[in-house]
Amino acid sequence: MHVGNQIILWRHGQTDWNVANKFQGHTDIPLNAVGQFQAQHAAPMLAAITPTMIIASDLVRAQSTAHELVKLTGLEVLTDARLRETNCGNWEGLTGDEIRKVDLDNLRQWSMGGDNPAGGIGERRSEVGARGVAAINAALVGKNNQRLVVATHGGTARTIIGTYLDLPIPFWSRIGGLSNAQWSILEESPKGWLLVEHNAGSIPEPVMGEESGGVIPDSVR
C-alpha cells in the first residue's frame, strides 16, 4: 500500500440484541427501527468525506448500514465475510448476566483483554484481527489515496485497530467501544498507521452490547 490511504471503520446501527445486551457474534440479527435511523443519520456525514470504496461484513446488520451510504454515493459494496463480528461460540444469544452464571471465569478473562476463545468454542481476538485486516489489505492492495469505508461490528473494529496499531493484544481492551453507527478512522503515514478519530459521530451515545466493548460490569472486573 502507499501512503495516503484512510480506513473508516463504521459500526452497524442498533439491533434489538444490542438493546438487550445479548452477544450477537455471527447470529444474523437485523437493524431495528432506531438502528435504521442511526445509519440514515450517519450516512450523509460519511458521504461528505467522499469515500472511494465500501466493503462490508456479510451479516445483514452491516449490509443494511452500508447500503445507506450506497444510496448517497453510488458506490458498490464489496462483501467480505472476514469482516464479521467475533464468533462468540456458546455465548451467542445470551446476555452478560446469563453468561456470568455459567461461564464466569472465561468471561472475566475475555473481558479483561485475554485472547481466549469467546464462548469456549468461538474465536480468539487475534484471529478476528487477522481476518479483518486481511480483508482490508486485500481491498487496498495496489491502491493509493483511498478512503475506504468498512461497515463492520464493534468487536471486529477494535481488533482491527489493535492490529494496525501493533498494540499488544492485552491492550486492545483499552480501546473504547464504538457506539452504534459511529466510526473510527485509521490513516496511513510514514510512521505507520495512526488512529486519527475514534467513536466519531454527531452525538455521543452509550455503547450497547458487551461484545462491542462496552463498560465491563463490576462483577467481571
Image (spheres, rainbow, N blue to C red):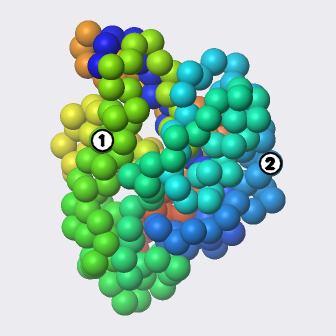
Q: Is residue 178 visible?
A: no
Image coordinates of residue 164 in percent, x first then y, are: 29, 33
- Pick the quarter of the image with the N terminus: top left
Q: Residue at x 50, y 51 (%)?
A: 57
Image coordinates of residue 147 in percent, x first then y, are: 51, 21
Q: Residue at x 33, y 19 (%)?
A: 142
Q: Secondary structure at mark 2?
A: helix
Q: Nearer the viewer, residue 105 or 200?
A: 200
Q: Residue at x 67, y 57 (%)?
A: 14
Q: Would residue 120 appear left or right of 48 to someone viewing this image?
A: left
Q: Earlier in the sequence, mark 1 or mark 2?
A: 2
Residue 134 tag number:
1
Q: Tell me which corner region of the image, top left, top right, bottom left or bottom right, holds residue 192.
A: top left
Q: Secondary structure at mark 1?
A: helix
Pointer 2 residue: 37
| Real-space CA distance between mark 1 and mark 2, rounded to the nearest whole angstrom | 31 Å
Q: Residues within 10 Å of mark 2 (few under 14, many from 20)?
A: some
Q: Residue at x 38, y 52 (%)?
A: 82
Q: Is residue 80 visible?
A: yes
Q: Amino acid at mark 1?
A: Ala
Q: Amino acid at mark 2?
A: Phe
Q: Would residue 64 appear left or right of 33 to someone viewing this image?
A: left
- Pick the quarter of the image with the C terminus: bottom left
